[in-house]
């Protein structure tokens, strides 16, 4: 039941080791092809890796993270790391933010500053960053949802909101399923109402065209679901031993998730991206964060739908309705907020446009408070 203060303090030897490994990289040759056709371009990655080695200041980011009150507590036999930033308003709505993969609490560092009128709680998913990794099978989004509900109960919050994007979009609805009498509403960045093949026969022509576009988007880039479902142990050797291999993998996914006309590290502050990659590196989280894909989770291939379904016990709102189809989302959710024109072009919109996300969170929770 103890909640212990926590402070990030990466040993200097770990920073020195990272820089030494970066300096000794044995670079792969550039394969034929244009741009990102064969993956992360060598010239692009060399420049970013050199900046990581000589320009990026982990200690400055560490000090910035330590400005947030951080804690550790044991729930379900596992240590859970979390940020807890209280509002000056004692009657503020408590808001639980859940990050996705391949992110961490770093996803919300910029957003927190825009949420002074909320009590903000940001836990690290088990296996990510400073939260202990699952020690056995049986972990899924529902189990994390139960842990999150237990955390909020331990912090003394009786009524609160939950948010989630990416894997957080699976976890946030599970919190409501676990504690429907305590959750004001579920806010999902996007991802509800995605059609599957079985929905195709009943689609309108417009929906069918939308479905084909969505399929093209979802099959682009590298299928991290398949890789981390099939052989995460195999790939984790490279991610855990070579910082450039880890950086290449992360940047591949940040770019796959990017629909803007600029590189991902221009759409999102590259220092924030490198802080997230560094956090994975220092905590050796590349492999331990893969459990959601190979475990008994809603993202595993045994699931009826690869997309988050949601819940209908409390109201639901989204930052962006599209690319989902509202008619389909309303089969499993009570949708009260479905905007179609919010700004942004990156999957991790809280990192790209924290101001817009904060404004939209206020709109939703004004409806359900």
Image (cartoon, rainbow, N blue to C red):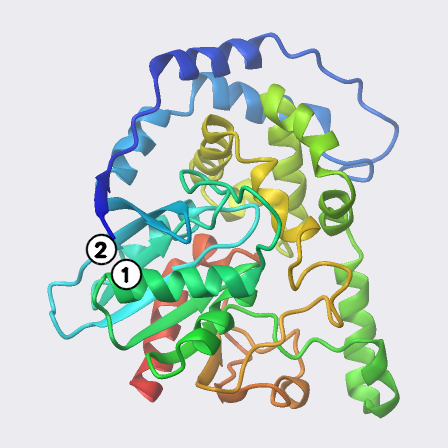
Q: Say whether residue 179 is left or right of residue 31.
A: left
Q: 10 Å neighbourhood of mark 2: few (<14), some, or many (≥20)?
A: many
| Mark seen at residue 332 | none
| Residue at x 88% of width, y 88% of height | 201
Q: Say whether residue 192 is left or right of residue 14.
A: right
- Residue 307 is drawn in which quadrant? bottom right
| Residue at x 33% of width, y 79% of height | 182
Residue 24 placement (x, y as % from top left): 61, 7
237 and 115: which is toward the camera = 237
| Mark seen at residue 120 | 1
Q: 10 Å neighbourhood of mark 1: few (<14), some, or many (≥20)?
A: many
Up-down relation of residue 113 to residue 134 (above or below): below
Asked if disc 1 and disc 2 are in contact, CB closer than 8 Å, the reply is yes
| Residue at x 47% of width, y 38% of height | 276
- If you read the primary sequence from the N terminus, does the residue marked by circle 1 or circle 2 appear first? 2
Q: CA distance from mark 1 to mark 2?
A: 5 Å
Q: Secondary structure at mark 2?
A: strand
- Residue 257 visible to the viewer: no
Query: For mark 2, what is the residue?
Result: 85
Which quadrant holds the C terminus?
A: bottom left
Residue 239 placement (x, y as % from top left): 63, 28
């Amino acid at each position: 039941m103890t909640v212990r203060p926590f402070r990030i303090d990466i040993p200097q030897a770990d920073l020195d080791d990272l820089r030494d490994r970066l300096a000794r990289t044995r670079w792969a040759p550039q394969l034929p092809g244009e741009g990102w056709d064969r993956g992360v371009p060598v010239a692009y990655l060399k420049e970013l890796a050199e900046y990581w080695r000589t320009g990026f200041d982990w200690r400055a980011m560490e000090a910035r993270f330590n400005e947030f009150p951080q804690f550790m507590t044991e729930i379900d036999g596992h240590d859970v790391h979390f940020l807890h930033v209280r509002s000056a308003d004692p009657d503020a709505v408590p808001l639980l933010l859940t990050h996705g993969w391949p992110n961490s609490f770093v996803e919300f560092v910029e957003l927190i500053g825009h949420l002074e009128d909320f009590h903000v709680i940001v836990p690290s998913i088990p296996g990510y960053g400073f939260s202990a990794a699952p020690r056995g099978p049986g972990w899924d989004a529902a189990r994390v949802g139960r842990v999150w509900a237990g955390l909020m109960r331990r912090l003394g919050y009786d009524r609160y909101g939950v948010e989630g994007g990416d894997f957080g979009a699976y976890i946030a609805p599970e919190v409501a399923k676990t504690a429907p009498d305590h959750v004001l509403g579920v806010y999902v960045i996007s991802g509800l109402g995605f059609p599957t093949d079985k929905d195709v026969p009943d689609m309108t022509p417009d929906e069918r065209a939308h479905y084909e576009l969505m399929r093209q988007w979802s099959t682009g880039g590298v299928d991290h679901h398949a890789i981390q479902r099939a052989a995460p142990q195999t790939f984790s050797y490279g991610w855990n031993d070579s910082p450039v291999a880890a950086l290449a993998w992360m940047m591949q996914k940040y770019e796959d998730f990017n629909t803007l006309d600029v590189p991902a590290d221009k759409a999102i502050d590259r220092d924030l991206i490198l802080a997230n990659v560094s956090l994975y590196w220092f905590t050796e989280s590349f492999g331990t964060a893969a459990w959601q894909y190979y475990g008994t989770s809603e993202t595993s291939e045994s699931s009826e739908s690869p997309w988050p379904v949601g819940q209908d016990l409390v109201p639901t709102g989204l930052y962006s309705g599209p690319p989902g189809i509202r008619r389909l989302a309303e089969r499993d959710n009570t949708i009260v907020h479905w905007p179609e024109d919010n700004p942004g072009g990156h999957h991790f919109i809280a990192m790209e446009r924290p101001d817009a996300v904060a404004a939209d969170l206020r709109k939703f929770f004004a409806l359900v408070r």
